[in-house]
Amino acid sequence: MTIYLKLAWRNIWRNRRRTLITVSAIMFAVVFAIFGQSLNRGSHEIMIDNMTRFNTGYLQLQDRRFNNEPSLDNSFAYDAQLESRINRAHPQIELMLPRIETFMLAADEEATRGAMVKGIEPEKEQLFNNLEQRLVNGRFFTSAQQEAVIGQGLAERLRLGVGGTLALIGQGRFGMSASGLFTVVGIVDHPLREMNDRIVYLSLATAQELLAAEGYITNLLLVPERPRDTDRIAVALRHEFTAADLQVLTWPELMPELLDLLRFDMAGSYLMSAILYVVIGFGFFGTVLTMTLERLKEFGILLSVGMQRLRLAIVVFLETLWISLLGVGCGLAAAWLVLLYFHFNPIELTGNMAQTVIDMGWEPILPVSFAPELFYTQGIIVFILAMLVFIYPLVKIARLNVLAAARS
Amino acid sequence: MPVVQTRQLTRTYNPDTIPVHAVRQADLCIEEGEFTSIVGPSGSGKTTLLNLIGGLDRPTSGSVHINGTDITGMSDSKLIDFRLWHIGFVFQHYNLIPVFSARENVAFIMLLQNRDKDEIARRTDELLDEVGLEKRKDTRPAQLSGGEQQRVAVARALACEPKIILADEPTANLDTTAAMNLLDIMTRMNREKKVTFLFSTHDQRVIDRARRVVRMLDGAIVEDSCHEG
Ligand SMILES: Nc1ncnc2c1ncn2[C@@H]1O[C@H](COP(=O)(O)OP(=O)(O)OP(=O)(O)O)[C@@H](O)[C@H]1O
Ligand SMILES: [Mg+2]
């Protein structure tokens, strides 16, 4: 095999300039594809990260019916026994955040708005997402008092400030009517815009009492010690809770709409990459085509002296492989350097765009993504290109007539 | 058993349009250790006959036996293997692998045969020594003269330990000195190692060195004479 690798390697350098051009073309395609997709994904990653940190978490335990029908009736009992079951199923869980969530009407003297009410344990949430840092005014509640922290958007709509009184009206568990008055003790600038306009945080105990759901929660967020263990933990928990009414959902299952939207948003950069690869693919094909045609006589000689067509095809395949490996190798390295540069010197947004992004609570820069997927997909694509391009010499070799080739 | 035995060997090009009878009903028998030259005017069918014997071309009718094996009906890949193990070729235009050194060109054939590494290295050295290229073993064809390239080609042809070496006008591109040098090597191989040679040529100097001369005309063998050289 080494002799074939050597032969293929030397063959590609018979026309140094042509090979260099082809390799750089592939390299540029890889760099541009990665760079384009990385910029696109970079902002997506921030969105997903915000979404997981400030809304869904990496992993949740819910009542089996809750995901389709998010009602308090589909809540479940949360106690020490459940906690120890979870810990037994998988020890690498750093935090458990019990939450009870429901929609209610929020009102002050003048206005009424729909609100997302979340009962939380603030000290634990704090450890996970540092929500307190997003307080623009006031403080967080600590215990089961009639206190609320609300989103800045909601506060503006209701014209409520710290110290104001908020009325919540709605339904508790099993249709019990629920209502209460709460003092606004803090206003948060919630990083998720939708939440900012409707979030009302209560302490878990307060919310449970309001909603006639003592001891019950709707979601239990599990924070893994290492986020990349999410899927493994989900598997372990699913195993533990097969028979129970509880279901385990991971973050992609918790935000399907957002992910669909982001996938759709990637379409543009995928299309650009596809066009780039088609163009580069033709260039690559041209190189392999001439490399084949100008050597038909040589191929004929090799068959004459006893080299099987299959072995000859292997050598030519190794040639296309060498070229694509060089292209991909240089491309990945260069792309990584480019991303590194833009990671440390990010592109800054200006004007309206910047303001929108700032309003959403993000830095006005274009972040880059280093997702491994970005890198290995390019390798796979170029490998597929190499396979496609190789069809031509393969057919030529299979059909080659020794004498006709020798005369050419 | 003869090394080459053809019976009523015929090759007709374009049988459906304007037939060209490149070789007609040729009966040729070559014994081991012979040093035979095929001669004849241009277009008389020398190349075609050699190609048929070497299994590079397929006869329209008749048969070719090499060392008793009928190669006429062999499949393409069997024939390639047969050539690898039993027939050595020397071409007019040398046709070495340009990216391989002399050494690698010779070794490559034995690598295709999956021979033992040490044996390949040893034999490659020996063969290149025998053709007088001790000092140019690691040179690529482009840096070798025509005569040197053709000597590498002879070494390559010998590498597979063939029953016979077929050479189509091996000296046509060489000057007199190189041609004579090549002929010396071929004659010596023939005499010392009993390698059987069959070559075509226009070159009178080459014809003079052959011990048997087969003359062709319009595809037919018209004369077959032996003379001790
Ligand atoms: N592929 C082919 N198709 C048609 N005719 C061919 C083909 N190859 C050879 N011929 C014809 O067959 C005849 C014999 O050709 P061949 O090449 O064997 O002659 P040759 O004796 O080797 O000639 P030269 O001394 O010029 O090399 C010639 O008339 C030639 O034109
Ligand atoms: Mg000829």
Image: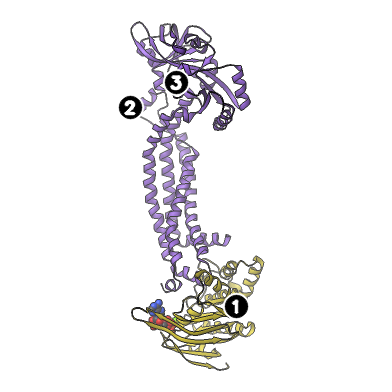
Chain colours: A purple, B yellow
In the image, is B128 to the left or to the right of A353? right
Which three-letter amino acid code belongs to the residue tagged 2? Asn
Asked if marks 1 and 2 touch (Cβ < 8 Å), the reply is no
Upstream in sequence: badge 3 or badge 2: 3
In the image, is A198 to the left or to the right of A245? left
x and y percentages locating residue A349 in the rendered image: 37, 30
x and y percentages locating residue A82 in the rendered image: 59, 20
Whether labels 1 and 2 belong to a single chain: the reply is no
Mark sitting on residue A70: 3
Please, what secondary structure does the residue beneath circle 1 have? loop
Q: Visible in this render: residue B170?
A: no
Whole-number angstrom distance, CA of label 1 to CA of label 2? 81 Å
Mark sitting on residue B132: 1
Which three-letter amino acid code belongs to the residue tagged 3? Pro
User: What residue sits right under mark 2 in the picture?
Assistant: A352
* Quadrant into which the C terminus of chain A falls: bottom left
Give residue B70's quadrant in the image.
Answer: bottom right
Q: Is residue A288 or residue A244 the one in the foreground?
A: A244
Please, what secondary structure does the residue beneath circle 2 have? helix
State yes or no: Cβ of the residue under disc 2 lies below 8 Å from any atom of ligand 1. no
Whole-number angstrom distance, CA of label 1 to CA of label 3? 91 Å
